[in-house]
Image: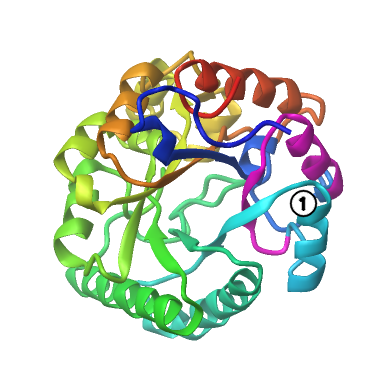
Amino acid sequence: MAQDKSVNPDPRYSKLTVGVCPDQWGVWFPQDPKQIPWETALDEMAEAGFSVMETGPFGYFPTDPARLKAEMDARGFRVVAGTGWGILHKAEAWADTERTFRAIGETHAAVGAEYVVHLPPMYRDEHSGDFTDDRVLSPEAWKLYVENATRLGRMMREDYGLKMVLHPHGDSHIETPEEIDRIFEATDPEYVGFCLDTGHIVYGQGDPIDMIRRYPERIDYVHIKAMDADLVRQAHDDDWAFAWAVAKGCSVAPPEGEPKMPGLIEALADLDKELYVVMEQDMYPCDPGAPLPIAKATREYLASLGLGLA
């Protein structure tokens, strides 16, 4: 199996470790009839040459630590991160959020993971596109969001040894550059890291390369993917739900789309620190035969730029 480290002679590149997660296989939910079975996805991820795994929606892969480790070991995978959704801006939701992340923490600490990715709840339904929450948070809700982000990050660090990283997302309350700036200003970096999702930053009409250069100390983890800039503009101009934009092909495979990968990977290398760079492409729902060839081609393209092996 291909190794995950770059062979670019520049030592900065050797600190970038490429990985994969179920999103690259069109998986958004723990269970969904439109998604590929987890066993098939895992086999195909190994066939595509990956060896580093972020497990994606909690419950898609087995949640029992012994079973999860056995399945990953059998295919040569090292689990580095788990993923979870959790509401932070509503006091009545904290108990469910804590319960979810404790379950994720227990499983992933037991298999040697280092990170947990917090995906912000979307204010539009992922199937219907209907609004399910306020598009803009009140000052009180935003204050609680920030307080609970630190609370959750501290819990994950102190109880499970995991670094929590907040993830920007289309149709969420941390989508635009201004919202991300606000998060950076208000949160404690000791407990609240940041997952630089290059596709969602482009979708939020930001520039991930600029963000790397302005906030090098806040970039702890990376999701690398691209968006069709024209469809991003249309999505915002016509007020599409994020899920509709994805269904129309907004998320694309590099070298197509934005950001341009040579400059992005160079900017990541300039950080000169150890980073997991997890490959993604939003494709829910997709033909079950589509993800494997796309993943192989994308991984090989990124490897040609110094991210992993060709």
Q: Position of residue 23 (x, y in %)?
A: 62, 42
Residue pointed to by mark 1 = 32
Q: Is residue 117 left or right of residue 271?
A: right
Amino acid type at mark 1: Asp
Label 1 secondary element: loop
**Would you say residue 3 sits in the magenta stretch?**
no
Placement of 24 over or under 310, stated as above or below: below
Give the residue at x 50% y 25%: 7
Q: Position of residue 285 (x, y in %)?
A: 70, 36
- Residue 263 placement: quadrant: top left
Magenta part of the chain:
39-59
**Would you say residue 47 sits in the magenta stretch?**
yes
Give the residue at x 15% y 40%: 214
Q: Quadrant of the N terminus?
A: top right
Camera-nearest residue between 257 and 16: 16
Give the residue at x 58% y 25%: 309
Q: Position of residue 242 (x, y in %)?
A: 48, 39
Q: Is residue 73 left or right of residue 254?
A: right
- Whether residue 35 is visible to the viewer of this picture, yes or no, is no
